[in-house]
Amino acid sequence: MAGSLREREIILAGGAGGLGQAVAELLAAEGARLVVSYRSNAERARRLEGAGLRIVQSDITRPDDRKRLLDEAPALYGLVVLAGEPARVADAGQLEEVLRRSLEVNLLGPLMLAREAAERMKAAGTPGAIVLFSTMQAVGVFAGSLAYAAPKAGLLHGARVLAKEYRGPANIRVNVICPGVMAAGMAEASIASGKYDRYMREGVIPRFGRAADVARAVRFLLEPDSYITGQVLLVDGGLTL
């Protein structure tokens, strides 16, 4: 089937987390051949081993690790980069240090992996799809989010540049998903603490997001023969409106 992901090789970079597991389960159910990477959370990654997925330890900020990860999928069709980490600043004196680290893990690593994957697809003559993960904080303005939001906003623009560079005959599509307050992944602890309860009380969102909401968005953007590239898809229940 033209729209099927069956037997297509897809890498989920940073796919061992809460959102990544939901994406992996959905794509595996469709018969995609998945390579799931993790940087440090080996325990979470082991939970996916029983699903017949290939699990790879990889730090995508390192060139050698990116190459090793891409080598695991010689017939690469899709790349989903969920990798990243929070960038919290306890006091103003930490800002520069935290921002430098955030630039590395939330911008440089994902963009370089995406570009290197696109180059491999282009060389192989394989039309494909790349999905990068940013955040609602890259679209809406939230005080105190500089160290995290600025690199993630840079990722949005970088993805659009890649989409323009690999459009046309190469037909390698690059899109971005910006999750909102999700009851999985980085926001899970904040939801449990009540940090985001006001959005429910004030009627801003109907509920907190679920991992499945994100997984369906990823599947949509991976659709073979899609005509969508260079776009940003907010999965936030309307919060940033």
Image: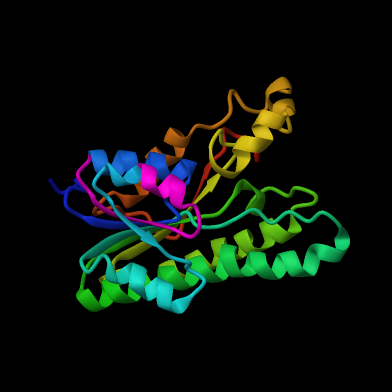
Q: Quadrant of residue 35?
A: bottom left
At 25% from the left and 78% from the top, the residue drawn is 123
Q: Quadrant of residue 22?
A: top left
- Please give the count of numbered marks on the rendered protein: 0
Q: List x then y, in percent, for residue 162.
A: 44, 70
Q: Quadrant of the C terminus?
A: top right
| Residue placed most toward the observer, 234 or 186 | 186
Q: List x then y, in percent, for residue 62.
A: 49, 75
Query: Does the magenta run of residues contain 41?
Result: yes
Left or right: 34 with respect to 202? left
| Residue placed most toward the observer, 142 or 70 | 70
Q: Is residue 166 visible?
A: no
Left or right: 75 with respect to 21? left
| Residue placed most toward the observer, 41 or 102 | 41
Q: List x then y, in percent, for residue 105.
A: 58, 65
Q: Quadrant of the N terminus?
A: top left
Q: Which residues are magenta?
A: 30-47
